[in-house]
Structure formats: C-alpha cells, structure tokens
Image: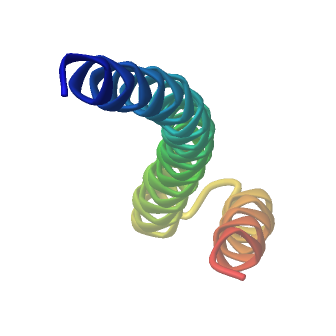
Amino acid sequence: EYMDIDRFLNKVAEYFEKARKLEGRVASDQDLKISDLLRYYVRDTDAAKNLLYRRARCLHDYENANKALDKARAKGKEVAAAETAQQAASEKFERSEE
C-alpha cells in the first residue's frame, strides 16, 4: 500500500510539473499577444494625435486666412492675394479631412 501511494504521488507530481510548464508557455504567449496589441494601440493613438494636430493646424491657418481676407477687404488693399491665400488654406483644410 505504501508503494501504491508513493507511485500515485510521483505521478501527481509529474502531472503538476507538466501543467506548470504548459501554463508558463501559455502565459508567455498571452503576454506576447498583449504586448503586441499594446504596441499597436500606441502607434494607432500616436497616428490619431498627429492627424488631429495637422487638422487643427489647417483649421487655424484657414481661420487666419479668413481674418486676413476680411481685413484686406476692409482696407481695400491686396484683396486678390488674400483671396488666393484663403482659397489655398481652404483647400488644404478640406484635403486634411479626407
């Protein structure tokens, strides 16, 4: 009876050792997947921030061009240049939204 218990406990110990190794591999795979996902989201977030900044910058330039055009029209000087600059800023802003 003592030998049976000893054999049983050895088998259980071997099983737990194999399970521990397998769980370690699974955990390592999950860690790799999670870290890859995190890197993907970091790059995606950085790209979104950059796009948002560029769009905000284009909008700011467009608003400044509109103000410059209004001032040029009020003064009656360099209206054509201001209209050209405003149209270029408008096109750039619209392209940034695509």
Instruction: Name which residue lies at 78% across and 68% down.
Output: 80
Q: Nearer the viewer, residue 72 or 5?
A: 5
Look at the image and tell me in which quarter the C terminus lies: bottom right
**In the visual, does 57 lie left or right of 78?**
left
Q: Residue 14 at what x, y percent from top left?
A: 47, 23
Q: Residue 96 at what x, y percent from top left?
A: 69, 68
Look at the image and tell me in which quarter the N terminus lies: top left
Residue farthest to the front, as pictured: 1
Q: Nearer the viewer, residue 8 or 95?
A: 8
Q: Nearer the viewer, residue 71 or 61?
A: 61
**In the visual, does 8 lie left or right of 77?**
left
Instruction: Name which residue lies at 48% across and 45% down.
Output: 45
Q: Is residue 84 above or below residue 40?
A: below
Q: Residue 3 at what x, y percent from top left?
A: 31, 19
Q: Quadrant of residue 74?
A: bottom left
Coloration of the structure image: rainbow
Instruction: Name which residue lies at 44% across and 50% down.
Output: 60
**In the visual, does 84 lie left or right of 37?**
right
